[in-house]
Amino acid sequence: MSKISKISEIFLEFFKNYPRKFLFLFILLLLEGVIAASTVLSIIPLADYLLDPTFSNPSRVTRFVLDFFSSLGVKVDFWLVGFIFIGFNILKGVFKVAIRYAILRIKYSVLRGLINHSLTKFFGARWEFFASSDKGRLLNTLNKEIPKIGDTLGQLATQMSSIVQFAIYIIVPIWLNAYMTLTALVLTFCFGLPFLFFNRLSYRLGKLNTETSNIELGILSEIFQSARIILGFGRQAYSKLKYLEAFDAHINATLKSQTLTEAVPGLFAPMGMLAAVIALGLSLQQQGQVSELAAVMWSLLSAMPILSALLQTHVNISNFIPSFEQLQSERNRAYGLREIEGEKVFDKLNNCISLRNVSFSYPSRNKTISNVNINLYRGKMTALVGKSGSGKSTITDLILGLLAPDFGMVLIDDIPFSDWKQNTFREKVGYVPQEPILFHTSIRENLLWALDTASESDLWDALKLSNAEQFVKGLPEGIDTIVGDRGVRMSGGQRQRIALARGLLRKPELLILDEATSSLDTESEKLIQKSIENLAHKMTILVIAHRLTTIIKADKLYVMHDGEIVEEGTYKELSLQSNTMLYSMLNNQNNNN
């Protein structure tokens, strides 16, 4: 895709979504153009007065002004022509501010639209998109590259304004003195031609700037996410140095990129002024009218910064294209991994959720699960056990639709998962992962995040069911206590019980407990286990367990090994048979305790 077609694609999206804002800007540009032309012309009567207060040999413009005010019975003097000149410049300044405001509105509207569209694409993708993403690249795309696109779009809108202004600044002087104006334009073009070759260099520097920014933000994100282990291993200095090296590489790239962007107008401006001076010198030899030559010179000098800005924007476009390419790449990848939505709206589970002959493997890995058949019956507790890496959590992701099977089907009441509006099902699921994610806000807000319509009594009922009521009431701020980033101010057991309460607040059709007690101390494990036992037969529950004490009350138990279901039955049936894998797992856990 060429540079022009890429820019056209962005603007097509903008015009389609924001036609009124564009029309408003266009009207302002036309009005500003009229004011700019009047500003240039208002110099001529002032110059004529300064040269000859009697106006014995006025220019065409001055003669028009004299005739106009004479018809009104107003005498033309220095103060009148001076205030006319100042008045038009004030109006020009007002319109310049209005246009800048309109351009900023356009910029931020487009920026918001790009972010909204990108997040829609990202969150419309399966979990595989996020799991396989380079976090630094994704963060940089949203945090830096999209704003860079927005800035360039703002500059392009400014360029539209500049083109209108330039046209006005050139049309008027061409009418006044075509020879001087055309001479200046030809010289300016010749002087500016070498600057166009900066485009290719600008693109390369823009691409390097984007790539080094991806790496820098990726390392920074990793450092903050791993702060606990960094401190625990005493590797602060190493982590800091690693980030600073990436930061230095990015600064080196962005310095070159930004310097080139600023160098173009800085070097071009004096070349444009030189062209205007040469043109004026040649015109003076032809003995043109001084007041008109002054107006032409003023107009040309006013036009040169506009030309410089146009040239700078031209270079910026090449610089920002890598940002747009990266955004498009991420959006296309998300679209390629999009969820396939059905039309059926999930209300409640009538019979069971089934996995039938399901196989799945992650990219570039051996088969994760193979030919799995599982039934989660309504109102029953189903347990899934096995060693780490046996495929248990993959089963959870398949049930939630975060992953799509390579073979086989996931069914809800005998209807394929792909036929359902997937979020209508997920909104009826309570999910408690092994590592509970709490947001940096209060316990109340963490609970309401799952169901923002919940009443105060609903919140406390959920806390009671999860055995969290007493410890929450004992906190200084109670339910309004801030939990810290990812719940860092709470103990592991407290975090897990708050996460369980959050899942229960929805009164879910399906409660999934994914290794919910694997990292807890004995006391916390007993509290969670008691909560699970109290919930048994009150809702449909899937328990994925490493600690086998949590699955004693399960109605059906599946044992996984190397991605396959190797045993199924009740806890009592499998635990009493010495030849079962469950029996062996129980013995190993008892010996280790």
Image (cartoon, rainbow, N blue to C red):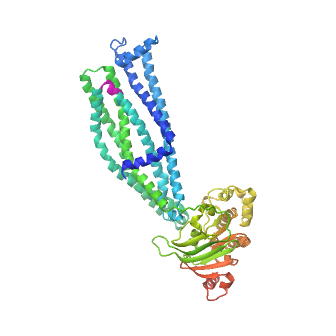
Using residue 105 as the reference point, say whether residue 505 is left or right of it. right
Residue 84 versus residue 194 in the image, above or below: above
Q: Is residue 228 visible?
A: yes
Residue 279 versus residue 156 in the image, above or below: above
Magenta highlight range = 172-177
Residue 45 lies, in percent from the top left, at 38, 18
Q: Is residue 254 visible?
A: no
Residue 8 in the magenta stretch? The answer is no
> Residue 554: which quarter of the image?
bottom right
Magenta stretch: helix, strand or loop mostly: helix
Residue 62 versus residue 588 in the image, above or below: above
Please report the residue visible at 35 percent of the width from the left and 41 percent of the height from the top: 311
Residue 173 in the magenta stretch? The answer is yes
Residue 183 lies, in percent from the top left, at 27, 31
Residue 452 lies, in percent from the top left, at 67, 55
Please report the residue visible at 37 percent of the width from the left and 53 percent of the height from the top: 1
Residue 451 lies, in percent from the top left, at 67, 58
> Residue 394: which quarter of the image?
bottom right
Total numbered badges shown on the rendered structure: 0
Using residue 225 as the reference point, say whether residue 180 is left or right of it. left
Asked whether 106 or 412 is in front, the reply is 412
Q: Give the residue furthest to the bottom.
A: 578
Please report the residue visible at 63 percent of the width from the left and 75 percent of the height from the top: 375
Residue 293 versus residue 382 in the image, above or below: above
Using residue 234 as the reference point, say whether residue 41 is left or right of it. left
Using residue 493 as the reference point, say whether residue 279 is left or right of it. left
Please report the residue visible at 39 percent of the width from the left and 25 percent of the height from the top: 40
> Residue 522: which quarter of the image?
bottom right
Q: Tell me the quarter of the image containing the C terminus.
A: bottom right
Asked whether 234 or 377 is in front, the reply is 377
